[in-house]
């Protein structure tokens, strides 16, 4: 809930764990892709959707409200060393987590050929095997990350109970670069709460046994400039192309890296 307290502060809700924080503002993803990374977009005022294409026309991101399916879908054409691949995300997938995926995709200094273990960030954050070593559950039991070995696909599912009704699901096709999935799981494992505004607060649960929810006064300028700061940071990244930082964990060989 966002309540203005004079011209200087605004009340913001901070929610953890982030996999139960709700979707957030899609502009956190779409605006930087367009303004900082050069992705172009079409404009159809009669359709409730956004379509963005990468400068090289190899990637297409579609945001389309679909009550029965995934709202976010990214499709990538085949390359010299990789067949076509896709990733998709449900409506309530937090934008902060999806953004780490798209940030890794557009990073000019990423080396996709490195050996990455997408499950390692989750293990390091205390996620534990659930029925198999290829299936990890979050400490609260609400989220499951799974490698489907037979198909080579990955999925992350968040639910509020043991039924098949999920809050959101992320799906990664067989040939999705592992470093992109690792960027996603790194953001998923981040324990820091995420800010949410809006009336009413649109989160999937208020159960105090599942989430922590605090409301704080934040400088209004901080809220107003957060997106601009993000766009600026990504723009600088593209002009300077710094060495890759540890935004995701990689495994150098058969033995799993520990820390």
Image (cartoon, helix red, strand yellow):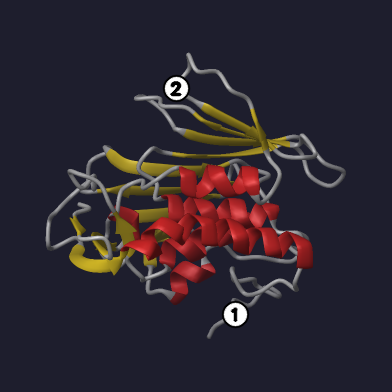
Q: Between tags 2 and 1, which lies in front?
A: 2
Q: CA distance from mark 2 to mark 1?
A: 44 Å
Residue drawn at (58%, 49%) of the image: 32
Q: Left of 4 or right of it: where is 75?
A: right
Quadrant housing residue 190: bottom left
Quadrant housing residue 213: bottom left
Q: Residue furthest front?
A: 7
Question: Can you identify the residue that label 2 sits on?
Answer: 48
Q: Report the number of numbered marks.
A: 2
Q: Secondary structure at mark 1?
A: loop
Q: Reading the chain from its start, which is encountered first: label 2 or label 1?
A: 2
Residue 78, numbered label = none
Is residue 254 placed above or below 20 in the rendered structure?
Answer: below
Q: Residues within 10 Å of mark 2 (few under 14, many from 20)?
A: few
Residue 153: give x, y in percent of width and height.
Answer: 57, 45
Question: Can you identify the residue that label 1 sits on?
Answer: 257
Using the image as rendered, state which of residue 227 and residue 161 is in the foreground: 227
């Amino acid at each position: 809930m966002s309540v203005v307290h004079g011209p200087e502060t605004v009340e913001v809700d901070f929610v953890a764990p982030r996999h139960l924080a709700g979707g957030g503002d899609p502009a956190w993803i779409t605006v930087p892709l367009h303004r900082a990374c050069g992705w172009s977009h079409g404009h159809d005022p009669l359709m409730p959707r956004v379509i963005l294409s990468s400068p090289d026309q190899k990637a297409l991101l579609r945001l389309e409200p679909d009550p029965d399916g995934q709202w976010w879908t990214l499709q990538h054409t085949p390359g010299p060393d990789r067949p076509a691949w896709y990733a998709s995300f449900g409506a309530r997938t937090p934008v902060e987590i999806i953004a780490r995926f798209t940030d890794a995709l557009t990073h000019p200094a990423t080396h996709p050929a490195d050996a990455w273990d997408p499950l390692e960030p989750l293990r390091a954050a205390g996620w534990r095997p659930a029925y198999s070593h290829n299936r990890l559950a979050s400490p609260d039991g609400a989220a499951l990350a799974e490698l489907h070995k037979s198909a080579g696909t990955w999925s992350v599912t968040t639910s509020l109970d043991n039924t098949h009704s999920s809050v959101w699901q992320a799906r990664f096709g067989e040939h999705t670069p592992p470093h992109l999935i690792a960027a996603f799981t790194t953001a998923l494992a981040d324990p820091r709460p995420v800010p949410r505004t809006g009336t009413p607060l649109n989160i999937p649960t208020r159960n105090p046994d599942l989430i922590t929810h605090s409301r704080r006064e934040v400088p209004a300028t901080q809220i107003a400039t957060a997106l601009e700061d993000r766009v600026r940071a990504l723009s600088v990244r593209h002009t300077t192309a710094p060495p890759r930082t540890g935004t995701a964990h990689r495994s150098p060989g058969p033995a799993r890296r520990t820390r």
